Amino acid sequence: MNNSEGYNFNDLFVFEMANNHQGSIDLGKSIIEMCSELSKKHKIRSAIKFQFRQLKSFIHPDYINADEPTHIKRFLSTKLSKKEFKEMAEYAKSKGLITMCTPFDEDSVDVIDEIGFDIIKIGSCSAIDWPLLEKVSEYNYPVIISTGGLEINDVDKIVSFFDHKGIDFAIMHCVSMYPTPTELLELNQIEIFKSRYPNITIGWSTHEDPNDSDIVMLAHAKGARIFEKHVGVTNKELKKLNAYSATLKQLDNWIEKYKKAKSASGSKNHIIRTSEEVKSINELRRGVYAKKTIKKGAEINLNDVFFAMPYNDNQFFSGIWKEGLVTKKKLKTNEALMMDDLIIPHDKKRLILQHHTHKIKAMLNEAKIQLGSDFQVEFSHHYGLEKFQEYGAVLITLVNRLYCKKIIIQTPGQEHPSHFHKKKEETFYVLSGELNTEIDGVKRKISAGEQVLVLPGVWHSFNTKTGVIFEELSTTHYNDDSFYKDKKINKMHKSSRKTYVDHWGRFLLDEKISN
């Protein structure tokens, strides 16, 4: 279920021609030209999509001349030959477009391969047509599947099928109503799909009123990364498109709104604030000022200061206030406390652990890992709390009997020094992030879903650049069973390199740490 090393479906636009060529290759080429011009103008990656039906076998012989269902007359009246479709596909490629085609029967899959399309698209009505899907899976084309009208169990089966077949694929949320009323768009399904199928690109096949170009912004914000829309061109014979197909102007507006949404969405990572934003915030901060005359070398406490606007560059401000500041100079009443004029004490050890706890709880929340309420937390700080950001880990013990289960968390940049266990055998299984291990001299990077075995007596160390959460599954843990390569760690008193609390130690840290 991982497209990361396969076909890149992200930010792909699909222009669905369907039968809007009206059986005319010239009109079809006009649609291709319109889509090519839009793609170049907006610098987007786009595919033109056709539909294939081998009508002689696709339509039951008794219904060739029937008035119902009305689709039959439509298909027959807009029929093109294989040669004509091939000419249009080659023309699309010459115009810089990706070619995509939806087969509605098995023979059409062979025709797609014969012509040489780039991607196969499965329409919603065929998404659980297993004979057709089996035929598609015989080839090695990337596949996109629409899911209109399907129950979630059907989508589960489709995902499992294509994953099992080793096909690069994506799925698209779709509501098969033409046009789709706004209140029935069900865009939350995009988020549901992203959560349920986290390694698959999710798209949105749209049939809403093409004048409504705002919906694409919501779809992008929900996580859609493929965008499909029916398109067409009018001429003397065709004065008006159907109610769900978009014209050049409508498509232009649609793509502009997508670009606006993408720009507004910003970074996928935690953002770095701009200097303009920082300046704006600083203008509203409260700076720290002397409430009275303070002698040089005096320790400053809360009763000695007040907080007020304005805040000056390089001034101490209320958000970083701490007791125990020492002034390097005499301060007059109402004078600003400037950073360069202060000796700033280090954070108390309790605060170091509290701030670290805030980070790891956020990491657990982000990874959607629930712990319950009955667990023990071990802050392992091998070179003291002052270096905890560089060396250490948080170990959460859930079970320790004949077997042991721990959740181990490291924040970005933390290292756990090389050591071994005489008694314990352990397996590391990564839940989130990346873990860099060195086991018996062999270095390895382990990603989410991967595991590694550490046998008793084997030297091992680990670190992370991204931040990592992993399970340690082992035999019984013993407190005297860790032996470090750095002998200084072995000589340290246990209380100097480890802090234990039940749960998160909300009211216990002051008791565990002297300062």
Image (cartoon, rainbow, N blue to C red):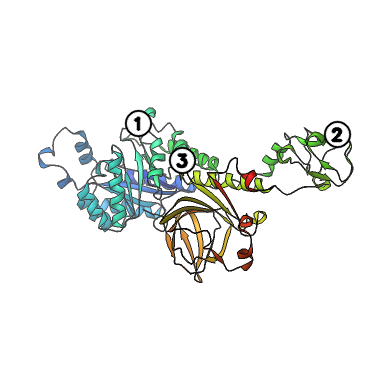
Check disc 2 and report the residue beneath it.
Answer: 334
Q: Residues within 10 Å of mark 1 (few under 14, many from 20)?
A: some
- Determine whether label 1 and label 2 are within 8 Å by CB: no
The answer to which quarter of the image holds residue 321 is: top right
Q: What secondary structure is found at the residue carrying circle 2?
A: loop
Q: Nearer the viewer, residue 398 or 469?
A: 398
- Determine whether label 1 and label 3 are within 8 Å by CB: no
Amino acid type of disc 3?
A: His
Amino acid type of disc 1?
A: Thr
Q: Residue 401 at x, y = what percent?
A: 42, 54
| Disc assigned to residue 220 | 3
Q: What secondary structure is found at the residue carrying circle 1?
A: loop
Amino acid type of disc 2?
A: Asn
Check disc 1 and report the residue beneath it.
Answer: 180
Front: mark 1 or 2: 2
Query: Quick check: 391 above or below 237?
Result: below
In the rendered image, is residue 270 in sight? no
Q: Nearer the viewer, residue 449 or 37?
A: 449
The answer to which quarter of the image holds residue 223 is: top left
In the shown orientation, is residue 24 left or right of residue 317? left
| Disc assigned to residue 4 | none
From mark 1 to mark 3, how far is it between C-alphas?
18 Å
From mark 3 to mark 2, how far is it between C-alphas?
52 Å
Q: Residue 417 at x, y = what percent?
A: 57, 63
Q: Residue 437 at x, y = what percent?
A: 50, 64
